[in-house]
Image (cartoon, grey):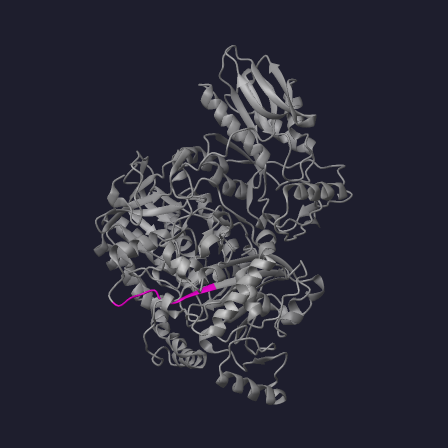
Amino acid sequence: MSAETKTGQTPLDVDRQSIEVDIACAGFGPAMGGFLTTLTRAWNENPTDPAFESRVMPGMPLQVMCYERADDLAAGVSGVVTLARGIRGSFPDLNPSEIPMACEVRQERVFYLMDPHGASRRSVALRLGDMVLRGAGSVLRIRNHAFELPWTPGFLHKRGGIVMSIGQFNQWVASQLMTSGFVQIWPGTPVDTPLFDRRAVSGLHLSDQGVDKQGGPTESYLPGMDIRAQLTVIGDGPVGALGQALDERIGLPEGHHRHEWALGMKFVIELPETQESDPTLSPGTVWHTFGYPEPEIFGFLYVHPDRLVSVGIFIPSWLSDPTRTAYRYLQHFIQHPALWPQLKDGTLRSWGAKSLEESGLHGEPFLTGDGFARIGEGSGSTNMLTGSGVDEAWMTGVQLGESVIELLRTSKPFTQQNLAATYEERRRASWVEHGARQAKNARTGFQGGFVRGLMGMALAGLSGGRLGFNGYIPPPEKQIRRFSSQVEKLKVRDAARLAIEDGRPLHDALLSARGWPEIPFDGRLLMSHQDALLMGGKVQAMPGFADHVVFRDAGFCISCEEKTCIAMCSGQSITLGPGGLPTFEREKCIHCGACLWNCAHNPGGEHTNIEFKAGSGGLHSAEN
Amino acid sequence: MSNSFHIVVCAGIVPDPLQTLEPNIGPNGPALKNEMMLPAVLDPWAASALYEAANLAAQCPGSKVWLVSLGPKAKLQQVMMTIAQKVTFELVPVDGPIGGFADAHATAAVLAATISALPGLDRSRLLLFGGWESASRGAGVTLQLIGERLGISDQFQGIDQIAVRADGSFETLERVEGGRHQVSICAGAPAVLGWATGDLPEPRNNPQVGMSNMRTLMPALQKAKTAKLAAEGLHYVSANLPRQQRTTRVVKDLATDEIAADVVAWIGAE
């Protein structure tokens, strides 16, 4: 392998096996599901169609290989509610009951949650607003510290949509794909980098195995294979190694940047049988919440069949507080008086988290190039006005699939020009793009505060994107407020002392120091973060891979006071080590990617001080 | 005597041990809740047998490895996408009910009949491999029963190592009580070897091995025969998970002796 094939690290100078395929794909999620389903359907209609004959193995069908990092294709992390326009387009006769944990949306409600503890960081204006709401409680039917909006705004509606588990959906799609024998999907196979030929991509390079934490070869060294392909499809998500390498190599289009992120974290809770007849939480129920545990944190509750509930929160990058944390916040969220009566007798079945790239069109990368195309969330398809990403991602995969079929049938090569004329054209003309334009500036207002942000969302949503707030969105590391006051610094030191003396995680101690009540652990639903890792998340990492989280410059980490990477680490795999340096344990990482954008330091360029590379393992939960 | 073997590995699939498992009573008796929903893995004990079989086949040129697996076709397909990257084998899938609570005799009958029907199998060179235990509801007797049905009287259980000699005989290390191994010498195939953990690491995922296996894997899955397990007369009184208890204490700066004493006291209390 030549040095030009890799970025960001020095390749080991060894002989590598290389194979040639027609189409190489990185990442298996909804977008890749849409792409491979479209290709497979077309091939199934006429397997002898010469367009589907392999160019690298004449006489054989196209050789389509898809490589996925996770140990199982069901190990996706997301409980979603989706309109499923694209998905239903691919499966017109879709019956949600065929997919475990899926059902049609039956009712939607929106709640503004007030803070029953007085611990959240509410502005004076918001506190006044809360007082007014409480004062008018009987008129506005304020119950359990919650105000239910009398209607659900149209842009939030998922009427006719589906509640589902992405893990189960991925498993269902993959099963159908592999039965055809047309495509091969290989889990447990992280993809390290694209194979570059100047600005073109000529395939992908799989991660080395049998290496130590730093990537050095051990006795069982197995060099990562080069997969050479005429077309490389990149669908490895918002924190995927290939997408990052491409952005590093060819940059983003002028004026584009990826500055808006969020961490979604959720529990899957099994409700007791006694609640089966409770119409409040009948299957297909969807709740959207805002205002608690911090004003900037949006929440959700989706009810699946069989008394399973997905309940979670989103911690956005514009929550400027460096003591941001997700797990403890999630525990406070489910205990809010508006949710707790329904959930308190439940049992935690599963738990998970993932980063969401929320820049939308602002962060759209080059969608095509010579030999490559990008689909899904990593291609900027998520619509942050409607809070929808799965259907959009699926649709981008479908659009690329249709485009590839067109190019195959007309015997045109996968050049940037041809991919742009087919895939990009389809995407620009579709509802995905239409929605993305409406959502483009919907969240910009949050940079100016919670109330301004809500107004911006409402304006954009109600005007179809014509109105809203423009403004500069700083890089994520600039959105993290520094500890400036002595009081704050003392609180952090108190928390650090508590963490050291009591053996509890730093983020937990930080929230306690800020006045949040302790969590009354019951070992069933409310449990320590570590116990959730063992009981509800199930994390595993195959031995023999290098650490995929790397701290670029130890000097920055040692001098960093905020240590937001530790507070926001979903798996507690980043902890405070000796000398103030964070340490990383690969075996506990759930690959949420939060560390990538929760570092307060920027040694240069678009990077923070944390590198998030290709890695193996992660959550084994199939209910997420 | 030839040193090449026909190695048939019997391996079932079980729910990924990292999942939350919960027994319940289904329409056909005891079952695991949501089992079809959970990701599956090759039974870890049998997986050791497969890796040892591949290693032995590599040492003994002319050998061949079959993997006979009984389970729902869709689940088998899913598991094979991981296993097929590790070692070379020919899959012989049997489409059947998921997992356990099946009668070991009925399972053994189906597997023995499947093995008997393998085209090209030389039973004089047959080594029947499998796990001596199962990670899921194993009765611990299925492999022996298959051996009995195939008329193989040389049976070894709890194997951690096999060493083939120049004359075709082989030496095995069998786990016995007291943490010891028993050394046995067998004149040669046919024989049944129920594997413990063996001493090989899990092979790395190798895409080239995967692509090679894939040529036969999908056609085999598409042609998989369906088997019904006879369960007449089988009645389960109850089904329970092994009791698990996690008690976390954070104690700092404890001396090694104190830790040891604490563990001994904890074991004694069990």
Residue A52: name its quadrant: top left
Image: A355 above or below A292: above
Name the residue at the right extreme. Answer: B237
Main secondary structure of the magenta stretch: loop
Residue B5 image position (x, y, % from top left):
51, 19
Residue, x 61% and y 53% (percent of image)? A535
| Total labels drawn | 0
What is the x, y in percent for residue B8? Answer: 55, 26
Span highlighted in magenta in the image: A255-263
Note whether A127 is above or below B127 in the view shown. below
In the rendered structure, does residue B14 fall within the stretch colored magenta?
no
Residue B174 x %, y %: 63, 23
**Is residue A242 visible to the viewer in this orientation of the structure?**
yes
Kindly identify the residue that appears in the image at 32 percent across and 77 percent down: A471
Q: Is residue A1 above or below residue A236?
A: above
Name the one closer to the observer, A267 or A96: A267
Q: Is residue A323 left or right of residue B116?
A: left
In the rendered structure, the answer to whether residue A286 lies left or right of residue A564 reads right
Q: Is residue B177 above or below residue B204?
A: above
Q: Position of residue A39 (x, y in %)?
A: 37, 50
From the image, which quarter does the N terminus of chain A lie in?
Answer: top left
Q: Is residue A301 visible?
A: no
Q: Is residue A623 rendered to the left or right of residue A192?
A: right
Between B51 and A472, the one nearer to me in the picture: A472
